[in-house]
Image: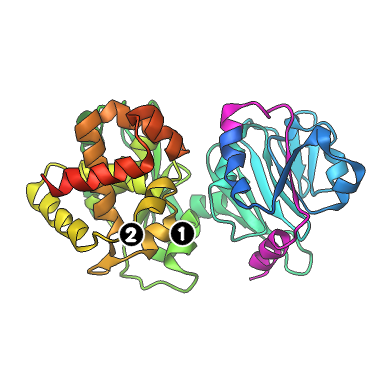
Amino acid sequence: DSTGSIWNSFYEQNDKIMVLSDKYLNDKEYKRMYGYFLLDTMLKAKPESQLNEADYKKPLLIFGPVNGFKNWNKFNVLVIKEKNGFSFLNTHYNGLNDGVYYSSPNRMVYTGNSLQPVWELQSQPKYYKYTIVSNNERIIIGDYDPTTEFKIDLVAIRNNNYKEENTKYLKIYSSKKISADLKAKFISKTDSIFSEICNKLTISPPDHQIICYLHSEPNEATFFANFYFMQGFGVLPLERTFGTVFMKQLHCVGLNLDIIRHEGFHALWDESVGLSINAFFSEGIQEYYQWGQDTAIVNNNIRILKKYKDYDITDLVLKGEIQNFWGGPAENNWPIAYPLSGLFVKYLVEKWGLESFKNMYIIEDKTVAFRKTYNKSTEELICDFRNYVINK
């Protein structure tokens, strides 16, 4: 609650400024990253070089690698810029993929030693006053306020409660609560699933092992994977199973190969093709892989499309926000966005090919992506999709 209060109090201020790094200002990836914040029309963006003295007294969202700012000390923040990195709460971080996010009523900071950790921090929900990432992993979460201070060392918790095992494709951390015999049988089948995915969608096998957590119950997974926005903050029923990919790591509750297949697909696709925050296409390509050639499932999903023919999918297609993806109409307690996204991707792949889809996928501005890849507007593409699918 206190973290949410800080977040909201910052964003409710009308004079807030997003401070951008002059060093990275023309970097294509940096532009893509900070562009998401500018959906808030009350947030004014300024390069550091354009700040005046009065600006430093305003609420500031400081965004970018620490080495990209010349006058860091003037921001008056808890993150200290150092010669070879930064320090936070008296701990030094000099790894290339080290980063920190923290929030206060008048400062919000996303920084690190390169763009990669800044993106990792940006793309996860913020349920703690600070988060530390290192080497593509969230390692520490906590609260810096002296009256409510705490620190949770996720690496220490993992090392004490999980066992490391390795396969060709996976570095597996399995809960020590899981039966060794059941776990061994399960793990022996995982590599063949990954080979199948790579072959079917012509994506390259990873050149390193993907981290995979096997959790014994859902509360472990929610904690490690920061999955509260989907599962809630209450204690979850122990029999619940689910999976997710968080910071390129697989998290699976229960020894369920279908979960490994689903989440493993996401991890492999992200590694080979690239990341996207548009859930409509990240889930749509997985749905296409799973049932795109199954006539019975395709026909049932076309039935759903016809039933909801007046449902406007424009926002889903353009933005793919996870809340809207899960929060729309449902059939049998399952969001219709899943079958609709799979049908949409099936249409794109069958009409223009998989490689064109991959190119479109990594362009976050879908209006630009559709025009550049398919030479169509969003409206034309959605209209053609409905006609194409319904008339098949």
Q: Residue at x 69, y 34 (%)?
A: 65
191 or 166, nearer to the observer: 191
Measuring from the top left, give residue 356's x and y in whole percent. 31, 27
Locate residue 49: give its quadrant.
top right
Q: Which sits earlier in the primary sequence, circle 1 or circle 2?
A: 1
Q: Residue at x 65, y 58 (%)?
A: 142
What residue sits right under mark 1 in the picture? 227
Task: Count residues near mark 2 (Cα–Cα under 10 Å), then give few for <14, some for 14-19, many for 20+.
Answer: some
* In this view, 26 is above or below 47: above
Mark 1 touching mark 2, by CB under 8 A? yes
Badge 1 element = loop
| Badge 1 amino acid | Phe
- Image label count: 2
Q: Residues within 10 Å of mark 1 (few under 14, many from 20)?
A: many
Query: Tag 2's secondary structure?
Result: loop
Q: The disc labelled 2 sits on which kind of residue?
A: Phe
Residue 220 included in the magenta stretch of the image: no
Please give left or right for residue 56 compared with residue 297 in the image. right
Q: Using the rendered image of the protein, determine whether residue 119 is visible from the camera's viewpoint.
A: yes
Per the rendering, the mark at residue 242 is 2
Image point (76%, 41%), residue name: 87
Which residues make up the magenta segment? 1-30
- The image position of residue 38, as x and y in percent, is 62, 46
Which quadrant holds the N terminus?
A: bottom right
382 w.r.t. 232: above or below: above
* Residue 47 image offset from top left, x and y in percent: 76, 35
Q: Report the quarter where the C terminus lies.
A: top left
